Amino acid sequence: MELDPAQFTTFTASQFAQTVKSLSDKDLRELLGGDKRTAVLDAVFDRFPEAFRPEKAGDVSKRINFRITGGPGDTSSTYALVVDSGACTIEREPETDPDISLMLGPAEFMKLIGGVGNPVMMFMTGKIKARGDMSLATALQNWFETPRS
């Protein structure tokens, strides 16, 4: 499996979902466990502001941290989605406490973001761990357009 991280910046939502769906968990772990990790994660997170649906979020101010494990040397990467008054921005390696923090592995992250995984089942089976405002985890699903394969 050889994917260029730049592909993730040009994929349509449907192409992104199809690509994630076509990769095995092992492929996804390898993709996000190697030297392309930061480039792929940056490209994926850069898609969030365009997928944001401000009419669904309303006039809230919330911070959602995603901690993706499985990096080189068993490292993790943390990104924050900052939703504030109808806008969504991304912070890499955030330093401010979030309203909710989600921790998940690389395959689970890509499946969740790609619309391939079931977030409720992932949470119930412990593949997603959450700390903070749990009601925000449910609302978050509605705030972003989910890619469909």
Image (tube, grey):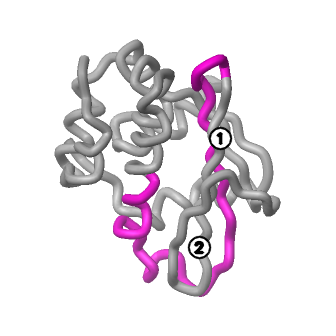
Crowding at mark 2 (Cα within 10 Å: few <14, some 14-19, many 20+):
many
Was residue 60 drawn as part of the magenta stretch in this picture?
A: yes
The residue segment tinted magenta is 45-74
Kindly identify the amino acid type of the residue bearing the numbered disc 2.
Val
Q: Residue 135, how many percent across, how many down?
A: 68, 58
Q: Residue at x 66, y 19 (%)?
A: 74
Among the 4 quarters of the image, the one containing residue 23: top left
Quadrant of the frame with the C terminus: top left
Was residue 80 drawn as part of the magenta stretch in this picture?
A: no
Earlier-in-chain disc, 1 versus 2: 1
Among the 4 quarters of the image, the one containing residue 28: top left
101 in relation to 20, above or below: below
Q: Residue at x 65, y 40 (%)?
A: 67
Q: CA distance from mark 1 to mark 2?
A: 17 Å
**Residue assigned mark 1:** 67
Q: Residue furthest front?
A: 35
15 in relation to 127, above or below: below
Crowding at mark 1 (Cα within 10 Å: few <14, some 14-19, many 20+):
many
In the image, which disc is placed on residue 83? 2
In the image, which disc is placed on residue 135? none
Q: Residue at x 65, y 58 (%)?
A: 64
